[in-house]
Image (tube, rainbow, N blue to C red):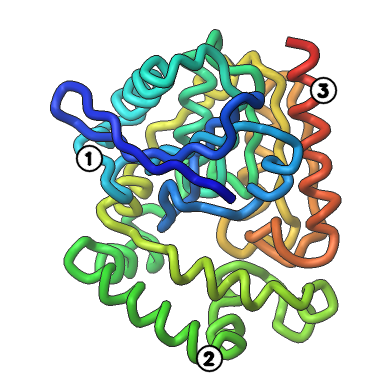
Amino acid sequence: MERIIDTYTIDGQTIEYSMIGKDGEPVLVMHGGHSNCYEEFGYDSLIKNDFMIITPSRAGYGRTSKEIGESLTKACDYYVELLNHLGIEKVHVLSVSAGGPSGLYFASHYPKRVKTLTLQSAVTKEWHTPKDKIYKLAQILFRPSSEKIIWKFTSSMSNRFPKFIFKQMIPSFSKLSYKQIKDKMMDEDIDEVRKMNNRQRSGYGFLIDLLQTKEITSKDLKAISSPTLIMHSKHDGAVSLEHAHYAHQQILGSKLCILESWGHLIWLGEGSKDIKGKLVDFLTRHSKAS
């Protein structure tokens, strides 16, 4: 895929972003945790169907200023400024995992800029709290002084022992055992996780994500008026299915699609082609309608 990487600076703050495609319907991707504008999951089907994909590295990720992430309000203001800079009026918003709150807030507060909202394995309310073990561990592993070392080690081990690392990471992504997952896997899944580990970084971003999940409210979700598709695996071990049900209850007219995929990474495994097709159909239908 031909990807253009650039930065846009306004008021002394920088947003790093990537663009794929030029003339298609624009899709604004709010990537997940530990990711950035180099994200790839799910992009292939969008590219094949001529969508233009804009992916800003969210606040604290990549070269995007961490100060943008002081609040969801501030972050979304800057995403609007990026769209203005690119001359794009309306977008399909695609929010993934820990990028859920960013997409929800954007759709809620900038309805005239949003054609549709899609939530994939998305966080839709307060997630890990300071009382949780995962939260406490994240403060150690994914703080800026240590995350680079963690991901460099993970990447190196994943390149040398891809199957072993894949099996070790399974509990982070799925409620299923590796034995159960084998029946739902595709041959390329292990290599896709290896490539994911090579592009992952946390920067300041993941710690910002943990703080921002408590900012999204029921009021925000109830204010969303754009057509909304919610896609979530019943076996997700990273973000519980409860988040999908909650969003479906709050967002009027939303469509809930509960998936049989093996876990959080819904773009992998058997049935992933069908999942990607559902998204393309949803975006295409509402592109024509708008």
Q: Nearer the viewer, residue 82 or 245?
A: 82
Mark 3 falls on what kind of element? helix
Q: Residue furthest left?
A: 12
Q: What amino acid is at disc 1? A: Ser
**Badge 1 element:** loop
| Type of amino acid at the residue the image marks with label 3 | Arg
Bin the neighbour count of mark 2 within 10 Å (Cα to Cα): few under 14, some 14-19, many 20 and up.
Answer: few
Q: Quadrant of residue 235?
A: bottom right
Amino acid carrying mark 2 in the image: Phe
- Near mark 1 (Cα within 10 A), the count class, few <14, some 14-19 or many ≥20, is many
Q: Answer with left or right where residue 193 lies relative to residue 12.
A: right
The CA distance from mark 2 to mark 3 is 43 Å
Q: Secondary structure at mark 2?
A: loop
The image shows a total of numbered marks equal to: 3
Q: Which is more N-terminal, label 1 or label 2?
A: 1
Residue 116 seen anywhere in this rendered image of the structure: yes
47 displayed left or right of 220: right
Q: Is residue 275 positioned above or below 17 on the image? A: below
Q: Are marks 2 and 3 in contact (CB under 8 Å)?
A: no
Residue 199 percent location from the top left of the image: 43, 64
Circle 3 residue = 285
Between the residue at mark 1 and the residue at mark 3, the CA separation in whole angstroms equals 36 Å
Q: Residue at x 61, y 54 (%)?
A: 41
Tell me the residue that label 2 is attached to. 161
- Are the two marked residues, 2 and 1, in contact with CB atoms closer than 8 angstroms? no
Identify the mark nearer the N-term, 1 or 3. Answer: 1
Numbered tag placed on residue 65 in the rendering: 1
Q: Position of residue 166 (x, y in %)?
A: 59, 81
Give 126 or 264, whichever is nearer the viewer.
264
Tell which circle, 2 or 3, labels the residue nearer the N-terminal end.
2
Instruction: Report the residue at 35% width, 73% height from top.
Output: 151
